[in-house]
Amino acid sequence: MALDENLFQNGEIPTRNEALRLLLASLAVEQFGLGRLINAEARKVEEIVGAQGSASISDLERIDRSVERTLRSIIKKEMLIEFQLEDILEFIRTRPCPPTPGEGTCQGLCGVISRGENNQPGPVTGTTTPEGNVVTLTVDVCSEGNCNDDLENGLVVYQEAGVAQLIDAEVTDVICRNRNVTIIEGTGTLVRGTEQTEGTFVLRITHRNNNTNNQSFRLRFISDEQGEPNYNSGRIVVEQGSFLANSCGDE
């Protein structure tokens, strides 16, 4: 399998798709090489066993140990390849963070911040449908470099008046499914009346809804014990500009 050497001419850096193709091709080459090693070991055993009784017990033991050592090395390499493949798949699922509305593609820091009165960092207010309960959400999440890198800060404060409140939220991941959606995942405690439940939350922020200029968000909370969603805010529509992507709270 030949790799395109032209990608590295003149010191040019491969694009995202080119890099993915090279990474997958390199794993395929490694798998092909391991397959040939396994075939070689199989032929070795066939030669010894097929010697029509001329092989002694000591010969069989020696070939058995040799094949075992080789297969152990191959298995270790297969585990490394699996880890590499998982990293590549995670890289494929992770898209560049969405740009600030009206601006160019995302560069540098990746994150999202909520803006309240006078477009200053603060809580965003909306209402649930059809109940009409008031919902407030404050977000200030920033990762260093691209999405899923080390988090510099991760503030998420959520409350549906008289129904539920998310406290002690700790952000673990910032994921960009495409240029229009930011997904924030983490752990925390959901308070409903006197009941407190620990679990994980998924906050989905849509920066531009189809056919409208509005933004929206949805919070889901999953209990650690039950392993199923026990809170869903539904889609909360807010005004355009309520969330600023790719700002990370910078001035």
Image (spheres, grey):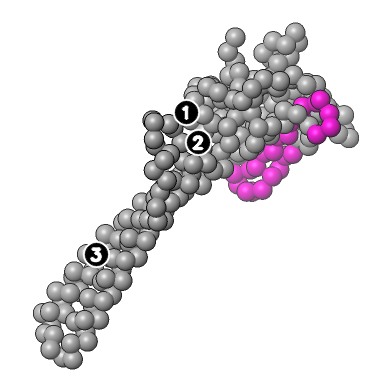
Please say whether residue 211 is one of the residues in the magenta stretch. yes
Mark 3 or mark 2: which comes first in sequence?
2
Q: Is residue 226 visible?
A: yes
Q: Which callout, 3 or 2, points to the residue nearer the camera? A: 2
Q: Amino acid at mark 2?
A: Thr
The Cα atoms of the two marked residues, 3 and 2, are separated by: 37 Å
Apparent side of residue 199 relative to residue 195 in the rendered image (left or right): left
Badge 1, how many Cα within 10 Å: few under 14, some, many 20+?
some
* Quadrant including the C terminus: top right
Foreground: 74 or 105? 105
Ranked by sequence position, the earlier of labels 2 and 1 is 2
> Which residue does the numbered mark 2 point to in the structure image?
15
Mark 3–mark 2 contact, CB under 8 Å?
A: no
Residue 147 vs residue 126: left or right?
Answer: left
Say which residue label 1 marks. Answer: 150
Q: Position of residue 128 (x, y in %)?
A: 83, 31
Task: Name which residue type carries label 3.
Answer: Thr
As displayed, is residue 154 above or below residue 185?
above
Please determine whether, in this image, residue 242 is positioned above or below residue 201. above
Cα distance in 3D space between marks 2 and 1:
23 Å
Question: Could you say whether the residue bearing mark 2 is in a helix, strand or loop?
Answer: loop
Can you tell which quarter of the image residue 32 is in? bottom left
Q: Which residues are magenta?
A: 210-232
Amino acid type for the residue under numbered disc 1: Asp
**Residue 162, x across and y down, in percent:** 79, 27
